[in-house]
Image (cartoon, rainbow, N blue to C red):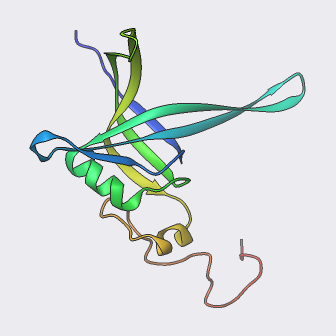
Amino acid sequence: MSGINKVILVGHLGKDPEVRHLDGGVTVASFPLATSESFNKDGKRIEQTEWHNIVLWRGLAEVASKYLTKGKLVYIEGKLRTRSFEDREKVKKYVTEVVAENFTLLGRKSDFEATPVNHAVAKPEHDFLDAGGVSGDLPF
């Protein structure tokens, strides 16, 4: 039986994607993604943040370079990959990354007005928070 390698993350970009163009015209983009969870410990609310290394290849990297910026909230699906390399002192290091297979930009409607919306994100046809110019409580 084969295994399943599937990761789903929702978090904020820690910085703008770093985009590189490799030999053969292959594009790769990478950025850190912060996810946070809260829990109670000894009566105090604790927030724990995890940082994930995200890597996107080819067309997905191109789209990310156009639409993703530091602080944006994004939904990412991908798989874990661990690779090794040697540092300058010839010490073998390991890094675990999430190789993204797709992403969706999340957030408020105003987040999309400042940045063009990518084709994978559906912009709402109606703004349900704007009740035809009427302000006040919702009728439910």
| Residue most extreme to the bottom | 133
Residue 46 lies left or right of residue 108; in this view the side is right
Measured as percent of width and height from the top left, residue 40 is found at 81, 28
Residue 43 lies left or right of residue 16; in this view the side is right
Residue drawn at point x = 53 percent, y = 67 percent? 111
Measured as percent of width and height from the top left, residue 102 is found at 31, 45
Residue 32 lies left or right of residue 90; in this view the side is right
* 92 lies above or below 25: above
* 89 lies above or below 53: above
Dividing the image into 4 quarters, which one contains the C terminus? bottom right
Q: Quadrant of residue 8?
A: top left
| Residue most extreme to the left | 24
Q: Quadrant of residue 90?
A: top left
| Residue most extreme to the right | 43
Residue drawn at point x = 47 percent, y = 56 percent? 69
| Residue most extreme to the front | 89
Residue drawn at point x = 61 percent, y = 82 percent? 130
Between residue 112 and residue 58, name the one nearer to us.
Answer: 58
Measured as percent of width and height from the top left, residue 124 is found at 45, 72
> How many numbered markers are drawn?
0
Q: Quadrant of residue 115?
A: bottom left
* 22 lies above or below 115: above
Dividing the image into 4 quarters, which one contains the N terminus? top left
Measured as percent of width and height from the top left, residue 68 is found at 42, 56
